């Protein structure tokens, strides 16, 4: 009989105080919520996803490009200085798996980075690739209500050829995006299978692609725990951080609630996966800038209400970061100068003075 690989022993983000972004001590100042809370649950959900600092460095899609990530972090530290750099919150905007050459090593590095830095200052968001990988691993099976199945998300899906055709018992209860990811082609997940299931990074054995049992056995518990606890959205006073974005003309609260609750019954989580949510005017329902990766742009695009900072989509390995609130851009590109793409940002001297009094 095939094990369901239930993850009841994994920490659960919604109920775990250890994974909450904001500590009780940090909540002394009232939080300006994303939307008026009509219930205690809505208030608590928002408070749990709040970053209690204006000083954030957001980093675009990494996609297993560990060396580029290390280079980017080094450039950020060099620009800000070590002491100042360590006072910033880091927000990774999602998509850590697929495409790049060092997926397993990248997750190891990220887990270590969070342990190394000051508690509650390093945050990792869920990307659509991470979401699909998590669903293939069935990391959310413990959250499925009795009598329900994530297999319902596959009903009436017109592109049957895209779906993983592995062990029937597993496939029947797997989320649509997990089945699409497991096939290899839709999400370009080949390198993730190779990274975890092959003995060396240079080995590429096609037989491991879609091998559910081998992949389950090869992904370390700590990595599963990492994916299981990724929040789907975060925010601070000035910004909303989300992998993809929001539809400009759909009520923002209606789009935020499923993210805050991490609604696993959605066949497609559009704020993580939709590529058309790129309106540089942001969203009419919020004063905050929406900061995201996901959509590949040649150069970072920044306005007072929107920031798009994925400059390679994991294809070339070039990475980008935005320093907030000044909205300065730093990339790994060799010939790129530091860009200040904002209007009304504060200068470095003022920023340094503010952070030194923290």
Image (tube, helix red, strand yellow):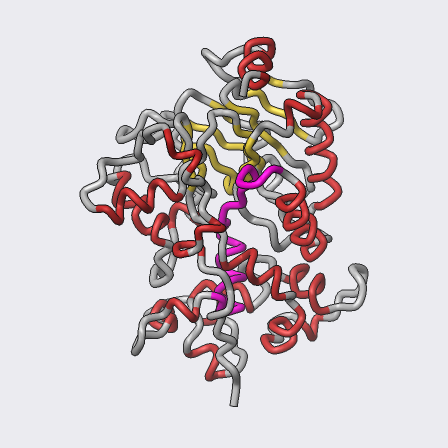
Q: Is residue 141 above or below residue 266?
A: below
102 with respect to 28 (left or right): right
Across and down, in percent, residue 50 comes to: 40, 37
Q: Residue at 48% of width from left, 79% of height from top?
A: 4
Farthest-out residue, front: 25
90 with respect to 239 (left or right): right
Residue 162 can be seen, yes or no: no
Magenta residues span 118-139
Q: Is residue 343 above or below residue 213?
A: above
Q: Nearer the viewer, residue 130 or 20?
A: 20
Q: Nearer the viewer, residue 288 or 146?
A: 146
Q: Nearer the viewer, residue 43 or 63?
A: 43
State the quadrant of the C terminus: top right
Across and down, in percent, residue 161 comes to: 48, 71
357 with respect to 175 (left or right): right
Across and down, in percent, residue 106 comes to: 68, 50
Q: Residue at 57% of width from left, 20% of height from top?
A: 328
Residue 347 can be seen, yes or no: yes
């Amino acid at each position: 009989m095939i094990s369901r690989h239930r993850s009841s022993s994994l920490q659960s983000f919604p109920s775990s105080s250890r994974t909450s972004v904001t500590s009780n001590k940090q909540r002394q100042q009232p939080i300006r919520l994303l939307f008026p809370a009509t219930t205690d649950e809505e208030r608590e959900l928002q408070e749990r996803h709040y970053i209690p600092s204006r000083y954030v460095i957001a980093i675009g899609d990494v996609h297993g490009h560990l060396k580029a990530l290390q280079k980017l972090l080094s450039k950020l530290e060099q620009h800000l200085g070590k002491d100042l750099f360590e006072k910033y919150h880091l927000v990774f905007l999602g998509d850590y798996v697929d495409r790049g050459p060092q997926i397993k090593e990248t997750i190891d590095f990220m887990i270590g980075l969070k342990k190394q830095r000051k508690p509650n200052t390093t945050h990792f968001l869920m990307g659509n690739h991470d979401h699909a990988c998590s669903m293939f691993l069935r990391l959310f099976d413990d959250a499925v209500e009795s009598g329900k199945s994530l297999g319902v998300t596959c009903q009436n899906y017109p592109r049957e050829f895209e779906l993983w055709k592995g062990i029937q018992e597993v496939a029947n209860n797997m989320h649509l995006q997990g089945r699409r990811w497991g096939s290899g082609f839709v999400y370009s997940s080949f390198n993730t299978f190779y990274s975890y299931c092959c003995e060396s990074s240079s080995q590429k054995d096609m037989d491991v692609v879609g091998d559910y049992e081998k992949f389950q056995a090869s992904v370390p518990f700590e990595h599963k725990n990492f994916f299981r606890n990724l929040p789907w959205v975060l925010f601070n006073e000035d910004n909303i951080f989300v992998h993809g974005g929001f539809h400009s003309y759909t009520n923002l609260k209606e789009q935020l609630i499923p993210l805050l609750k991490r609604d696993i019954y959605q066949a497609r989580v559009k704020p993580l996966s939709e590529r058309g949510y790129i309106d540089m005017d942001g969203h009419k329902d919020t004063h905050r800038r929406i900061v995201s990766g996901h959509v590949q742009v040649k150069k970072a695009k920044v306005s007072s209400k929107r920031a798009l900072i994925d400059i390679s989509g994991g294809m070339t390995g070039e990475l980008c970061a935005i320093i907030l609130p000044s909205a300065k851009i730093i990339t790994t590109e060799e010939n790129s100068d530091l860009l200040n793409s904002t209007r009304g940002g504060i200068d470095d001297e003022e920023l340094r003075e503010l952070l030194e009094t923290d």
